[in-house]
Each structure stands twice: as C-alpha cells, then as structure tokens.
Image: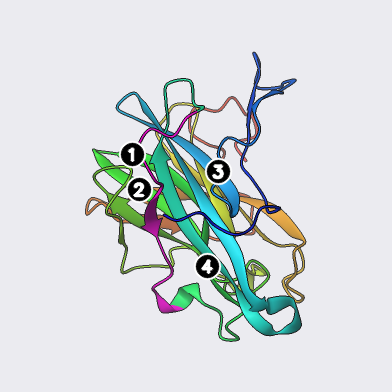
Amino acid sequence: SAKGTDPDGLRICLAVSDSPEGPFLDRQVPLFDAGYSCIDGHLFIYQDRPYLFYEMVGVVGEPWNDKGYFKGTILGFELSDNLTQIISGDPTVCVTPSQPWETPEDGRAISVEGMTVFEIDRTLYMTYSANHYADPRYGVGYATASHPLGPWTKSKSNPILAQNPSKGVSGPGHNSIISSPDGQELFIVYHSHADPANPSPQRVLNIDRMVVEPSGELRIIGPTRTPQPMPSGSNSKSGK
C-alpha cells in the first residue's frame, strides 16, 4: 500500500526484556513507518513464522466536531526471525468495516480494530472490535482464514459479544484470548464502559468464557456480571 501522509502520528515500536516483568528496553523505534498512525499491534506465530497485525487508524474531516469520522483497517505482514523487518512486501489488508454493526448510527466511526489471532484445529481465528469505542454498541466479532494474511472471512453471527443493558454492560470490546491453566477452557479478556449509563473512554476489565462449537463457530458465555467458577486447573480453594 502507498505511503501515508501522517508523519507525526502514532507508531508501533519493539522493546525487549529477559523477563515478562521487565524492564523492557527499546530495540527498534519505530518498528516500521508507513507514514500513517498505527495502533493495536498483535504478534502471532504461525508455523514457526512471526506475523504482526495492527490497525491503520486515521480520521476523515473533524469527527471531534461532528464533521467527519474515525476510520480503521486491520493489516498484517510477515516479520523476519529477529522481528525487526517486514519480509512479505507491503502490509496486507486483512479486515475492513463491512457489516452493519461495525458502524454507529451517528456515523462517527468506520473502523475495525483491537484484533487477536489464534489457531484451533488448523483454522485461524481473528477476534476484533468494531463500531466506536465510546458507543454502547461497540462489540466483538470474528473472522476465519487458512493463512495469517488471508483471505479473512467474517462470521455471519457477528457480533458475538455485545452490550447487555439489563446486566449493566455497555460497549464490550478490544480483546485477548487466553486458556485455563490446564488448557481445557478458553477465555476472552476485554473492556467495557465503567459507567454503562454514560459511555465514555473510561473502562473496566472483564473476563468471560469462550467456547468453540462443533461447527467451528465461536460463542462467548457472557457478558456476565456475577461470580463465575474459577478456570479449570486453577489452585483456588474457593472455586469462585
């Protein structure tokens, strides 16, 4: 893709450490520079090859003055073994906004973002967020592919995680996927609005169970606002 025109925007950088707790030291700043703002970097290893996914983010007009909209597209590329170089040519467009739920009614965002990629039974899944982060209808959908650079096909069941006013959940989105200590359960970790009655950039952390149906479809048991059983294989004595 062509070079962008945002020389002062956000960039993704690479830092390294001998421990997950740090301290982390800059290795490459920025990791790459395509001339546009990039956020939400996600590293995925596929068949011993590293791939980086991210969101190209920008604006059209002045959305903060209700005279435009935020835009976002998910791209990806293959990295060198030392994670410092793009080796697959130009970044590949993986997911763009196309489903009705992905755009708020006021049109202030046309964006997909916050992706996480993982593999189950030789199928690649990408969970991602869409709509506007401060809108109650901000949610999570997913797409599938047979290769990290696609083509990616969105689920017709999207969104699989959405607001639930009766439970006090507004704008659930931007996620990571983790497993239980024994590897038998999957969980989605995401944020939602701190005050459901007044959606804003203020958010809280949530964790819910996610299952893969025999058909391969993803389903989230949530959102929840009640105590849940601890993950299988945990050492908790309370069980909740």
Left or right of residue 30, residue 149 in this image: left
Q: Which residues make up the magenta segment?
A: 85-100
Q: Element at badge 4? A: strand
Q: Give the main secondary structure, helix, strand or loop, of the magenta stretch.
A: loop
Q: Nearer the viewer, mark 2 or mark 4?
A: 4
Is residue 6 highlighted in magenta? no
Q: Which residue is mark 4?
A: 111
What number is the disc on residue 41? 3
Q: Measuring from the top left, give residue 14's x and y in whole percent.
A: 61, 30
Q: Earlier in the sequence, mark 2 or mark 1?
A: 1
The residue that mark 2 highlights is: 125
Q: Secondary structure at mark 3?
A: strand
Decide which of 92, 150 is in the foreground and name it.
92
In percent of the image, x 75 and y 64: which residue is there? 201
Tag 3–tag 4 contact (CB < 8 Å): no
Q: Earlier in the sequence, mark 3 or mark 4?
A: 3
Q: In terms of secondary structure, where does tag 2 sit?
A: strand
Label at residue 119:
1
Position of residue 153 relative to residue 22, above or below, is below
Q: Please tell me whether residue 235 is drawn above or below residue 60 in the rendered image.
A: above
Q: How far apart are the two marked residues, 2 and 3, measured between alpha carbons?
A: 16 Å
Mark toward the viewer: 2 or 3: 3
Which of the two labelled residues, at mark 2 and mark 4, occupies the earlier sequence position? 4
Measuring from the top left, give residue 122's x and y in whole percent. Answer: 23, 38
Q: Is residue 164 above or below residue 41?
A: below
